[in-house]
Image (cartoon, grey):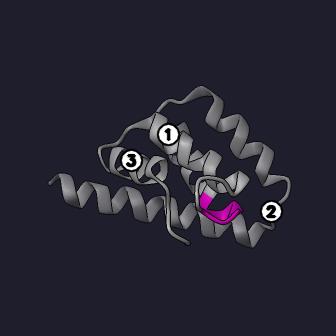
Amino acid sequence: MRGTDLLVATCLAAAAQGDGNAFFDLGVAFSTGSHGVDCDLVEAHKWFNLAAVAGHDEAALCRADISEEMTAREIAEAQRRAREWIAASSRRAA
């Protein structure tokens, strides 16, 4: 990841607090390659997945949309990363 801009840094901090809108914004950044991050559909899928789990309605649609451009292996990797994020967040909260 190249030098991230303030939006991404702010979203990462908010995501660490479980902010579903921050998850969604990160998904948008990674799916479009904006705000100082490279386009990375695996990372985008991960963030959209986390946003959907957090109750963000539009995130599930975006996740489904980018899934059409991904391989099964990429989707599995994105799901693994989302599970890791959830597990790490649970450990931080404990």
With respect to residue 20, does 31 lie above or below? below
Query: How many numbered discs?
Result: 3
Q: Secondary structure at mark 1?
A: helix
Residue 51 painted magenta = no
Question: Which label lies toward us, 3 or 2?
Answer: 3
Q: Which mark is residue 10?
A: 3
Residue sitting at x 45%, y 36% = 20
Which region is colored magenta? 37-43
Q: Residues within 10 Å of mark 3 (few under 14, many from 20)?
A: some
**Residue indicated by mark 2:** 70
Q: Give the residue at the far left of this rendering.
A: 94
Residue 59 x %, y %: 62, 36
Q: Is residue 92 left or right of residue 82?
A: left
Pointers 3 and 2 in contact (CB under 8 A)?
A: no
Which disc is residue 53 wearing?
1
Give the residue type that dot 1 points to. Val
Which of the two residues, 3 or 50, is positioned nearer the viewer here?
Answer: 3
43 lies above or below 47: below
Q: CA distance from mark 2 to mark 1?
A: 20 Å
Residue 88 in picture, x, y percent from top left: 31, 63
Q: Position of residue 25 (x, y in %)?
A: 55, 41
